[in-house]
Amino acid sequence: MLTLFYLSLTVSIGALLVGLARLSGLFIGVSAIAFVPTALYFLVGANNAYQFIALTPVVLLVVAFLLEYLKKRMLGLKKV
């Protein structure tokens, strides 16, 4: 079980780094989805400030949508 936790965390961090390097909303979205099991672990298992780690997938999804929106907006401005 702990192996799945570490695998999810590794995939999430790796996808986040690739997404930030390439400015890709897709990779950041994959990172958010991969981080959900880790977030649920801290949401259910912690009774202190560590529960705020559960908000990480939400923040990552907002960043991914915002990044894709800004990319489309900038491409739309370049065509004019």
Image (cartoon, rainbow, N blue to C red):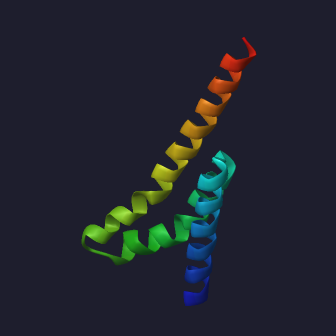
Among all residues in the image, which is located at the extreme left?
48
Q: Where 8 falls versus 63 (above or below)?
A: below
> Does residue 2 appear in the picture of this structure?
yes
Between 30 and 51, the residue placed more toward the observer is 30
Looking at the figure, which quarter contains the N terminus? bottom right
Q: Where 78 falls versus 25 (above or below)?
A: above
Please report the residue visible at 59 percent of the width from the left and 60 percent of the height from the top.
Answer: 16
Pinpoint residue 32: horizontal percent, then vertical percent. 57, 58
Please report the residue visible at 33 percent of the width from the left and 62 percent of the height from the top.
Answer: 52
Among all residues in the image, which is located at the extreme top?
80
Pinpoint residue 23: horizontal percent, then vertical percent. 63, 47
Report the side of 46 relative to 66 (left or right): left
Pinpoint residue 72: horizontal percent, then vertical percent. 67, 28
Q: Where 67 falls versus 8 (above or below)?
A: above
Looking at the figure, which quarter contains the C terminus? top right
Among all residues in the image, which is located at the extreme bottom?
2
Q: Where 61 falls versus 56 (above or below)?
A: above
Between 55 and 27, the residue placed more toward the observer is 27
Report the side of 9 relative to 26 (left or right): left
Pinpoint residue 37: horizontal percent, then vertical percent. 54, 71
